[in-house]
Image (cartoon, grey):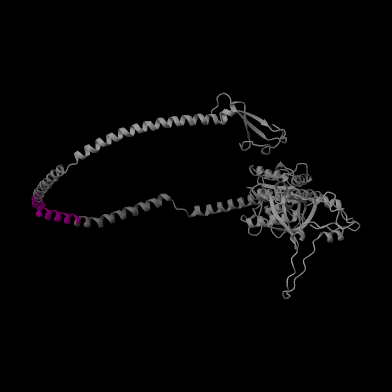
Amino acid sequence: MKRRRKAGEETPAAAEQGELFGAQGAAPKPPAAAAAAEPPAPPERSPAPEKPRAPERPAAAVEEPSAPLPSLPGAPARPSRAVLTVGELTRQLKETIEARYPRVLVRGEVSGFRGANARGHLYFSLKDADACIDAKVWASQAARLRFALRDGLEVVAEGSVDVYAPQGRYSLIIQRLEPVGEGARALAFEQLKEQLAAEGLIGDRRVRPPRPLPFLPRRIGVVTSRTGAALQDFLRVLHSRNPRLSVLLCDARVQGEGAAEEVARAIERLGRTDVDVLVVTRGGGSVEDLWTFNEERVARAIHAAPVPVVSAIGHEIDFTIADFVADWRAPTPSAAAERLSPVLRDLELTLATHASRLRQAVLRRLAELRERQGSVAGRLVDPRRRMGQERLFLSEQLEAMMRALRPALRERRERLRGLHERLQRARPQARLGEQRAHLLRLAARLQEAARTSIATRRAELARGQLGLERTSPAARVAAERALLTARKVQLVTLQRQWLLEAQGRFQRLAARLDAMSPLKVMSRGYAVALRRRDGAVVRSMGDVQPGELLSIKLATGGAKTLEGCEEIEATVTAVRGPVDC
């Protein structure tokens, strides 16, 4: 970055520039001396026609071009030239730049932002129309950002300039970041609002429409600070209208660091109780005071609540993210109490009026039913007389049915008798005898054919067996079996010999492995330090931090594995630099 020099500010002394570039007390050369030190430029040759060459001078008269020219009379002595290494030059630049710019404010446009890396650090560039500078935000600072970075966002960064010597690059280490033209909180508010709208938690396209509030809740859950004025206003209005309503309070901080987590946990705890509605409330204040209810954690807890949620944050002009996510927004805590508590006297008057109207309606209905019963009883006929008439009608119908069935039954019986006589004349026993004799003849023919076929097959089988015995490989099989037995004996011998050699080699390797075992080294008084949080071995002091828990393994008592070693738990109290061991 360029820095304009203020009026009246003196130019840095030559001695400071000499320190920067390594010159030890060197003064700038006068113009005349500088001109004298430079070798004269060779004159330009013109394309003239060749002339006869002059006789050459003796070699001894030619001067060496690189030899230094003699000093002019009265000229100052020429200073010795100081040569810096790259590391020395970079180190001096690092010390000068970091001392000159310990804190700067830089305005530029974010470029090359790819999100946080695996450790949570942010790397990007700040640029304008003239230049570009690398910027870094460490994870501890990135967690405090109130808005999301993106390419093209113009910001004002506060930090210090750092020079990375191994690469000779300088960058801006940012401690604070603010967007240009709008505050970080306003930008974070809009970004979170757009994100929740895209997910369907707020807006016209929310995945779950606002839930209706109960007319007369049995128990009301309240999330606020028990020492705040908002709770007192809420309870005063609620109990002045209906003192019989039950309130379950979950105390939580409503502003400051960690307040959002407490409010979210309070909502989740009340959601697991028997409350019919939740009220999230606090009194008025500045944007910073109300920012707890603009956190994403609180918004998601309100959306996940199993009962309707009423948001009563601040005054009527104050709007938070919680107001958009909640099922109903109350302009003040008192308005929330009025919405959830009908006036007890009005309820009692309404109940008395409805009870009186119901009593009169029941009496009128009873009178109408008694009058109708009287008229119906007058038209009712004696049931015994009606039963006698019905019994007589049933008897007449039964007699008529029997008169109609008798002729049909007589005709069916005559037809059955005729069919029986025809069956007796046909004699099916004779026909069955003929069929049985034919079946016996067919069975005899089948048996004869089967015997002939079996005899033919047996003869063919005998001929095949005779041919097989003539070409039997029994002799070859015996020879191969003897060869196989010899090879088997040889294989068993070789196997035993190889096994003995392998056992000897294994024992030698086991002895060497046991000599190099870490447990052997540890048994001589050494130990292994492990981090309790991930089980990693501590190899240097950079692997631990003060206050971290360590597990120290000692190989005593003939331990065979690292898990069988004795263990000592220790806490790191301090980390010191390397000393001579």
Counting from the top left corner in percent of width and height, residue 273 is at 64, 42
In this view, the residue in front, 34 or 256, is 34
Q: Residue at x 48, y 55 (%)?
A: 379
| Residue extent of the magenta highlight | 412-441
Q: Quadrant of the N terminus?
A: bottom right
Q: Where in the figure is residue 302, as x and y percent of width and height?
A: 67, 49
Quarter of the image for residue 412 reads bottom left
Residue at image position (21%, 57%) is 407
Majority secondary structure in the magenta region: helix
Residue 124 or residue 280, whichever sits in front: 124
Q: Is residue 119 left or right of residue 461?
A: right
The outermost residue toward the bottom is: 49
Which quarter of the picture shows residue 502?
Answer: top left
Q: Is residue 456 left or right of residue 128?
A: left
Q: Is residue 333 visible?
A: no
Q: Is residue 484 left or right of residue 300?
A: left
Count of picture labels: 0
Residue 191 in sight from this viewpoint:
yes
The residue at the far right in this view is: 8
Spot occupied by residue 83 in the image (x, y as percentages of width and height): 77, 50
User: Where the C terminus falls, by quadrant?
Assistant: top right
Is residue 246 on the magenta stretch? no
Q: Position of residue 144 (x, y in %)?
A: 73, 48
Identify which residue, 41 or 454, lies in the foreground. Answer: 41
Judge whether residue 414 is colored magenta: yes
